[in-house]
Image (cartoon, rainbow, N blue to C red):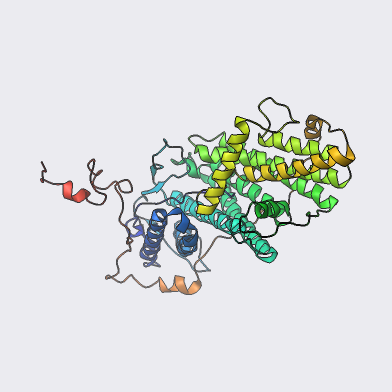
Amino acid sequence: MPFPFALPTTSYLSFTDCFNSGTHPSLPLTATICRGVVRDALKKHKRLPPQSQASNLSNVLATLNEYIPYVFALDSGLSGAPINGEEVDVVLVKEVEVQWRATLTATLPGREPPRIKLRSLEAELFFVLSTLAYTYSLLARSQLRTLFDAILPSSEQRAAAIASAMRYLLDANAIHTYLVHRSNQWSSPPAAADISAPVLSALASLTMAEATLIAVLKDDPYPAVVAEDRNENSKDWMFKNPDIPKVRAHLFARLCLAAAEHAAKAQGMLGRASRVDEGLVKYIDDLRRTARGKACRFFGIDAELGGETGKGIAWLRAARKEMGFLAADGDEGKKSRGFSKLKKEWAERREDRKIEKGGDWGSDAGKLEEGRIVDMLEKKWVKANDTMNVQLIPSSEPLLASMPSGREYHSQKPFTVPTLDADVVARMRAPPDPTDAAFKGGEEDSGSDEDEGGTAPVGAFPGTRAEYSGSNTYF
């Protein structure tokens, strides 16, 4: 958690071939240069090993923030809107033709996502803003990753990481929401499912669900307790049981239910889209289950603090049922055993290895981590109930049916359209220097990244396609 997006790559695009400006003739060339830097940064990021990509996100973010105001400047010039009070005239010479790799479109296993040909500045704007939102989500992941380091962070460091992750997710939500409203201007569905209205609406709901769960994580001590318990480097053999005030436990449950409602809305929107990546569909379903499981766990904590240990245990079993961790025979009073238990333990160990390597950890939306917390509490409460309280454990079905509605924590953050500074706009009144050339990037395109010149022959080394062209024949 959050979802491990793959940043898309794009083909080369020259705005000087598509636009002309009588008032600011340097605008198309400057926009082309900034876009070349973004294209180069995305390709370099893609070719980094997974362990190094998190540290490179700040560079990708900087290049995107540098380029996006120029796209909006071209868009404003086409529509006649002023930029910082200055009139900018942009004329369309020929239609924009660009390719973006659709990373959220379903593909066959083992194959890269397809590159989609797009024909409008609007599609370019949608893709580059979506890439910015993905970058914010990945930055939130990198902040939450520090909570599982071998050296556990202090309470202040943990709070700072969670606050940063929450801020990044709200920024991503603002972008997705802005694109949803702007997509109403489309006269026909776009060629790529990644920028279609249903997928954008689903991503807006997804980021709000993730941000709401992180608000709960900020004051939830149990994940830190479980992480410390399985940390081999921890020397704290004993710890004080975390205290959660009764009122806050009930409040956390309502917040988790709100997150589950957002995830369910995202799941419904994806049902209206076509050819969406199965990994995203599964993640949203796991996030909905995890949020409902957390809500049940907090209702159980609320009941246990009130002296109703039997009811608290029933809530924990309801949490396991919501997350799909029940025994194969359907008995909610028994834990998974046999093959089901081994399968769950194997999945947990695999997730731990992913966290250590820094790869696609959290692809289950934190479901296994929440299952560990529920198992820990259930073991403790069952032992106390068997030896001291001896309360009857009710069925979990009526409890699930009595759950209240969710309670919102965040209000949607509006997206502020970035604009060029007045001095930057003024400098572009000068004609471009004839010696200036648009930056195409220092990264070579692979055969799958470029359509120019066809595909490389089978068995050819990457980057040597030109040696097989022409009249040369090899025997």
> Quick one: 171 or 165, which is closer to the camera?
165
Note whether residue 266 is visible.
no
What x and y, as percent, mark residue 260?
A: 68, 41
Q: Does the image show residue 2? A: yes
Badge count: 0
In this rendering, is residue 187 above or below 43? above
- The one of 162 and 301 positioned closer to us in this rendering: 301
Splitting the image into 4 quarters, where does residue 322 fall?
top right
* Residue at the far top in the pictured view: 329
Nearest the viewer among 177 and 394 is 394
Residue 121 vs residue 448: left or right?
right
**Image side of residue 211 versus residue 90, left or right:** right
In this rendering, would 382 be left or right of 289? right
| Quadrant in the picture for residue 426 | bottom left
Query: Nearest the camera: 349 or 122?
Result: 349
**Quadrant placement of the C terminus:** top left
Instruction: Residue at 55%, 60% (x, y): give it.
Output: 417
Residue 194 screen position, x and y as percent:
49, 43
On the rendered structure, is 215 left or right of 50? right
Q: Residue at 43% of width from left, 62% of height from top?
A: 89
Residue 316 position (above or below residue 225): above
Q: Residue at x 43, y 50 (%)?
A: 8
Instruction: State the image coordinates of residue 207 (x, y, percent, origin top left).
Output: 61, 49
Q: What x and y, as percent, mark residue 150?
A: 58, 59
Image quadrant of residue 377? top right
